[in-house]
Amino acid sequence: MRYATDSELWQAFKNGDRAAFTQLYNLHIEDLLSYGYRVTSDRQLIKDSIQDLFLHLWRSRQNLADTDSIKFYLYRSLRNRIVRNSEKNNHSPIDSAGLFENIIGELSFEDDLIANEQLSEQHQRLKRAIHQLPRRQQEIIQLRYYHDFGLDEIGDMMHINPQSVRNLLHRAITELRECFSA
C-alpha cells in the first residue's frame, strides 16, 4: 500500500507496518546516501550510520514523535548519527576535499544534457567557488538549494540558530557573487 502523505506513512510505520517501513526506506535511501556524502567522504561511516538509523527507527518506532516531514527528520537524525559515530570511532567527520565534489555532483548530469560550452565553463567556476567556501557554508548551500530545507530546519539539523543560518548563507552567497563579478 502506498501512503498519500508523510503523516500517514509515518503513522503506519509507527504502528509496526513492515510495508510502510520498507516504503520509508526505499523513498529516502538514495537521498540519505547522497546527503551523507556531503557530510563526510567516509563511505563505511555513512553506511553504518544509515544502518544504525533505520535499526533505531524500527526498534523505537512506538516511542517516536509524530512528524510532518520525514525527510527533515531523517536528515537531521543521519547527520547526528554520523557525527556521533565519527566521534566514537575517532574519525574525522568532514573531508573538505571530497565534500566539494559531492555537493555539486548532481549538476554533472545536467551538464551532459545541456552540452553548452559556456554553461559548462560557468559550472566549473561555480564548483571552484563553492569549493573555496568554508565547510559549513558548503553544507548550508547544499541543504538550502539542493534539498529545499527551510532556514529553521537547517538550523535544527546543524544545531545552530536560524540567524546563524541566515548569516552563513548570506556570507556564502556574497562570496559566490564576488567570485563571479571578478
Image (cartoon, helix red, strand yellow):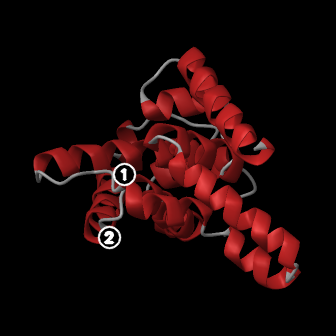
Q: Nearer the viewer, residue 161 or 27?
A: 161
On the image, which quarter does residue 63 sit in? Answer: top left
Tag 2 residue = 43
Q: Is residue 163 above or below residue 17?
A: above
Residue at x 69%, y 45% (from the top left corner): 179
Residue at x 50%, y 70% (from the top left corner): 22
The answer to whether the residue labelled 2 contacts the one labelled 1, judged by CB atoms less than 8 Å apart, is: no
Does residue 62 appear in the picture of this structure? yes
Q: Position of residue 86 (x, y in %)?
A: 21, 50
Amino acid type at image mark 1:
Leu
How far apart are the two marked residues, 2 and 1, measured between alpha carbons? 21 Å
Tag 1 residue = 57
**Element under disc 1:** helix
Residue at x 50%, y 59% (from the top left corner): 100
Q: Position of residue 105 (x, y in %)?
A: 60, 69
Residue at x 41%, y 64% (from the top left corner): 98
- Disc 1: CA contacts within 10 A as few (<14), some (14-19) or many (>=20): some
Q: Give the mark toward the camera: 2 or 1.
A: 2
Q: Position of residue 164 (x, y in %)?
A: 54, 19
Q: Which quadrant is home to the C terminus?
A: top right
Amino acid type at image mark 2:
Arg
Q: Earlier in the sequence, mark 2 or mark 1?
A: 2
Q: Is residue 144 left or right of residue 156?
A: right
**Element under disc 2:** helix
On the image, which quarter does residue 16 sit in? Answer: bottom left
Q: Is residue 88 above or below residue 150?
A: below
Q: Is residue 82 left or right of residue 16?
A: left
Q: Is residue 149 left or right of residue 103?
A: right
Does residue 12 appear in the picture of this structure? no
